[in-house]
Image: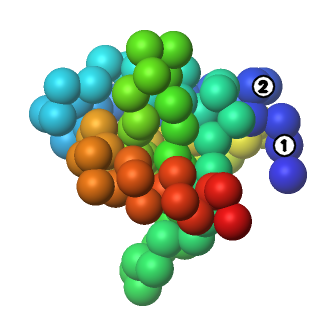
Amino acid sequence: MHELKELRFDWDAGNWPKCGKHGLSQADIEEAFRADPRIAPDPNPDETRWRAIGRLTTGRMVFVVFAFREADGALVIRPISARYMHEREVRKYEQQKDR
């Protein structure tokens, strides 16, 4: 897999409003990917998607659903939805991470 730090992000009027409606900025979402996120497949039947969980420098945890796309010969991340994680989700994530 490509190094995530080298990837570009694909933002447009189709994905940004859905990602931004939960209070995250584009910079926040991109930061979550640069902070060594935990990535797992998303069970979407229509398109190969992924889930990322990352921590911002503020300490807040972010959950992002995204797809990899190719643009101009480069692999790009296309965020589909993003939000801050709820406390209960963070606790569950931390418990699983410690196993």
**SS class of the residue under badge 2?**
helix
- The residue drawn where x is 45% and y is 22% is 59
Rendered position, 87 above or below 21: below
Q: Which residue is mark 2?
A: 6
User: Label 1 near label 2: C-beta < 8 Å?
Assistant: yes
Q: Position of residue 57 (x, y in %)?
A: 51, 14
Q: Residues within 10 Å of mark 1 (few under 14, many from 20)?
A: few
Numbered badge on residue 2:
1
- The residue drawn where x is 41% and y is 77% is 44
C-alpha distance separating marks 2 and 1:
8 Å
Instruction: Identify the image quadrant of residue 40.
Output: bottom right
Q: Residues within 10 Å of mark 2 (few under 14, many from 20)?
A: few
Q: Position of residue 49 (x, y in %)?
A: 51, 65
**SS class of the residue under badge 1?**
loop
Residue type beneath disc 2: Glu
User: In the image shown, does 85 or 42 lie closer to the viewer?
Assistant: 85
